Image (tube, grey):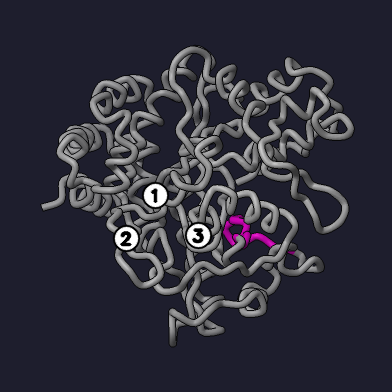
């Protein structure tokens, strides 16, 4: 989900940035938009496989044929790129993964219904050409392979290869589920920011769903998050908690090395290690603009990324239909501020257990204990979701099964 889709505004004019303070002010204002929390969104990503042989590579032509008028411009510049019937927009990731981004909704029940219908439509489109959606956070069948040959992804590949192989595999072989929450009122934003991070390790553990990569068990419950950890810590590690989150995020963002710089032509690579604030100081030719800074922000991949709203990125893709469970859980846990405070207290013992969560899931005893407490809290507030009774009962059973496995 892009900022424009959530706010309904057009992209702003690109303005030159002459000082570090201007850049930090831009990041803070663009990343944290305050107001009463009311909207929800979701982004769902899947690996894509041939039904007859999931190990067979999927080519760009297969995706174009399946998606038709919903094909994104990166695959077909002449495509009308129509949304799915419920409004979800289809995009394609560099390894051929398909992603749909919902429109924002005030009603959780409406969000679930429209996205469910859009997934059904997408499934039908793929099935008609012999393709299907994957059900894990990593590709369990195939080695990483680039499908999209664009300057952005080529430059990203070159930059990540300086660190190791994890970045390339993350780009081409992983699939996530992202929940988008409002930042909230200014006086509550720091607490909500802290709570969504505190929840990260335990929800990562509860919904870890990527133990196999390219035909082998990796030893990680969430191989997807393990790959993120190994990609480039400067852009993938969790944000620091405490103080004003907008100021702290802005300082981090402008001091993170540039991954690439869009230019005319096929080559977007830059010398290694140059940060955005160094570009402002003259490390690269010309003055950067707000458009350059917006692009730079799109190359940061922490577990929670502020984009005017909070884009929660620490969840693996889920089996068919079960994406609803983490979406409902996050929606009700952030619906009331009193519940947010309860989340902070319950999740405190596990706040720094990101690696343990990715490696062991709920086999970690601290995470398992926190998950049981959160399950009790979810039982108390699930009615806030205002779901149809049959769906609420189904979700309650599914959450119990995930948070307190037998």
Q: Residue furthest left?
A: 406
Q: To which residue does mark 2 refer? A: 218
| Secondary structure of residue under mark 1 | helix
Q: Which residues are magenta?
A: 81-93
Question: Residue drawn 19% across and 42% down?
Answer: 364
What residue is rendered at 86% in x and 27% in y?
16
Question: Where's residue 345, x and y in %?
Answer: 26, 21
Of labels 2 and 1, earlier in sequence is: 2
Q: Position of residue 295 (x, y in %)?
A: 72, 40
- Pinpoint residue 205: horizontal percent, then vertical percent: 28, 45
Q: Is residue 276 in the magenta section? A: no
382 left or right, relative to 48: left
Farthest bottom residue in view? 52
Residue 335 visible, this orientation? no
In this rendering, position of residue 115 left or right of residue 215? right
Which element is circle 2 on? loop
Label 1 Cα neighbours within 10 Å, binned few <14 / some 14-19 / many ≥20: many
Q: CA distance from mark 2 to mark 1?
A: 10 Å
Q: How crowded is the residue under tag 3: few (<14 C-alpha within 10 Å), some, or many (20+)? A: many
Instruction: Kindly check if marks 1 and 3 are in contact, taking CB atoms under 8 A apart as contact.
Output: no
Question: Residue at (27%, 24%) from the top-left corner?
Answer: 348
The mark that comes first in sequence, 3 or 2, is 3
Who is closer to the viewer here, 392 or 103? 103
Report the Cα–Cα distance between label 1 and label 3.
Answer: 11 Å
Q: Are marks 2 and 1 in contact (CB under 8 Å)?
A: yes
Density class for disc 2 (Cα within 10 Å; few <14, some 14-19, many ≥20) is some
| Label whose residue precedes the other's in the sequence (1 or 3) | 3
Read off the residue under disc 3.
169
| Residue 406 seen in this snapshot | yes
Q: Secondary structure at mark 3?
A: helix
Give the labeled residue for mark 1: 226
**Vertical relation: 183 (above or below) 386:** above
């Amino acid at each position: 989900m892009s900022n424009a889709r959530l706010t309904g505004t057009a992209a702003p004019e690109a303005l030159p940035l002459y000082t570090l303070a201007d850049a930090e002010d831009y990041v803070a204002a663009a990343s944290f938009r305050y107001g009463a929390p009311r909207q929800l969104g979701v982004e769902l990503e899947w690996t894509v496989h041939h039904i007859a042989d999931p190990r067979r590579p999927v080519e760009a032509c297969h995706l174009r044929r399946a998606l038709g008028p919903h094909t994104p411009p990166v695959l077909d510049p002449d495509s009308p790129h129509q949304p799915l019937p419920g409004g979800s927009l289809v995009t394609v990731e560099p390894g051929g993964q398909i992603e749909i981004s919902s429109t924002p909704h005030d009603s959780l029940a409406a969000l679930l219904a429209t996205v469910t219908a859009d997934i059904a439509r997408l499934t039908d489109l793929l099935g008609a050409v012999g393709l299907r959606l994957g059900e894990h956070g990593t590709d369990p069948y195939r080695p990483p392979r680039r499908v999209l040959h664009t300057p952005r992804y080529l430059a990203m590949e070159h930059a990540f290869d300086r660190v190791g192989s994890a970045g390339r595999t993350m780009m081409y072989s992983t699939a996530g589920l992202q929940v988008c929450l409002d930042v909230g009122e200014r006086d509550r934003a720091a607490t909500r920011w802290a709570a969504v991070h505190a929840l990260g390790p335990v929800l990562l553990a509860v919904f870890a769903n990527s133990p196999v990569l390219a035909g082998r068990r990796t030893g990680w419950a969430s191989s997807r998050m393990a790959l993120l950890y190994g990609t480039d810590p400067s852009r993938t590690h969790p944000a620091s908690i405490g103080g004003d989150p907008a100021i702290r995020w802005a300082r981090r963002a402008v001091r993170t090395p540039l991954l690439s710089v869009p230019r005319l032509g096929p080559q977007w690579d830059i010398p290694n290690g140059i940060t955005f604030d160094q570009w402002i100081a003259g490390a690269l030719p010309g003055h950067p603009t707000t458009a350059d800074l917006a692009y730079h922000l799109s190359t940061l991949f922490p577990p929670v990324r502020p984009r005017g709203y909070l884009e929660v990125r620490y969840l693996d893709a889920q089996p068919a239909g079960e994406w609803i469970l983490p979406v409902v859980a996050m929606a009700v846990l952030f619906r009331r501020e009193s519940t947010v405070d309860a989340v902070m207290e319950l999740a405190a013992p596990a706040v720094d257990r990101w690696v343990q969560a990715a490696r062991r899931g709920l086999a970690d005893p601290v995470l398992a204990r926190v998950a049981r407490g959160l399950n009790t809290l979810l039982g108390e507030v699930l009615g806030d979701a205002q779901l149809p009774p049959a769906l609420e009962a189904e979700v309650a059973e599914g959450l119990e099964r995930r948070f307190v496995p037998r």
